[in-house]
Image (cartoon, rainbow, N blue to C red):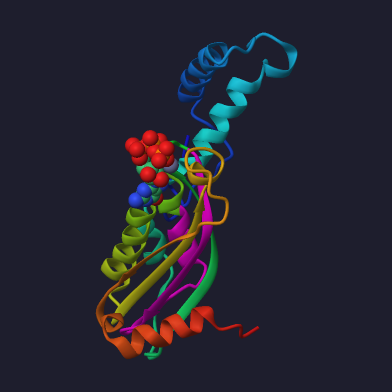
Amino acid sequence: MSDKSNNGYQKIDRYDEKVIGEIAGNYKNILASIGEDPNREGLLKTPERVAKALQFLTHGYDLDASEILKSAMFKEDYSQMVIVKDIEVYSMCEHHMLPFFGKAHIAYIPNGHIVGLSKLPRVVDVFARRLQVQERLTNEIRDCIQDTLKPAGVAVVIECKHMCMSMRGIQKQNSVTTTSAFTGEFDHDKTRSEFLRLITANLS
Ligand SMILES: Nc1nc2c(ncn2[C@@H]2O[C@H](COP(=O)(O)OP(=O)(O)OP(=O)(O)O)[C@@H](O)[C@H]2O)c(=O)[nH]1
Ligand SMILES: [Zn+2]
């Protein structure tokens, strides 16, 4: 079960036993349906393990990304672009429930307030830890930052590999999907180009 008492954060240190039981029961049937013996030793605890894994992989439904941002907004007179790049993304496509994973790059231009840097990857996780399509994930991150922080602009670029395109289906191993979403100042070519240049630059 999720714990939303701490500014929207969740501690995955306890699980909703009823939901775990339901999911595990279903997975026991799935094991039988694929021709396995759910009662053989190696699989005895598998339905429960899968249930807990699934609950972790979808725990974003229980979190409030806006509350997380609000918990660390600070008045500051800084109006240049702030970029957090190379944020690891792990999500699951809603079509096949297979992972897609890669990196998110986020920028915003403050408009009176800055936000604690760690909160941007936290926002990514809130929306990524759900069944998703990459496009919606990208837009949800952008909209949350824009609506909560109200900066002069937000930019989000996400690059991911989709397991449903590599380990099954079309089986293309190297294709990467890039999505982007912008608001405000990032609608101007010059600002957008600077952002794109900085996320591709090798500065470190
Ligand atoms: N736009 C978008 N498509 C996605 C995403 N994740 C998976 N898909 C696609 O969702 C589509 C579902 O298409 P369907 O034809 O209904 O499913 P399918 O028969 O399993 O398709 P194939 O993967 O082509 O075998 C596929 O083309 C997937 O590549 C995503 O994040 N965004
Ligand atoms: Zn898929």
The answer to whether residue 198 of the structure is visible from this angle is: yes
Q: Image check: 48 left or right of 65?
A: right
State yes or no: residue 191 in magenta: no
The answer to whether residue 81 of the structure is visible from this angle is: no
Question: In which of the image's four quarters is ligand 2 placed?
Answer: top left
User: What is the number of callouts on the image?
Assistant: 0
Residue at 44% across, 64% down: 158
Q: Image check: 27 left or right of 7?
A: right
Quadrant for the C terminus, please.
bottom right
Residue at 31% across, 84% down: 111
Q: Image check: 14 left or right of 58?
A: right
Q: Where is residue 77 in the image (x, y as percent from the top left)?
A: 38, 91
Q: Quick one: 175 or 105, which is closer to the camera?
A: 175
Figure check: 82 above or below 80: above
Q: Quick one: 128 or 190, which is closer to the camera?
A: 190
Q: Where is residue 131 in the image (x, y as percent from the top left)?
A: 40, 42
Q: Quick one: 73 or 178, which is closer to the camera?
A: 178
Q: Image check: 36 left or right of 41?
A: left
Q: Quick one: 182 or 62, which is closer to the camera?
A: 182
Residue at 42% across, 82% down: 195
Q: Quadrant of residue 181?
A: bottom left
Q: Position of residue 187 (x, y in %)?
A: 26, 81
Residue at 32% across, 84% down: 112
Q: What is the magenta range?
A: 98-125
Q: Position of residue 48 (x, y in %)?
A: 59, 23
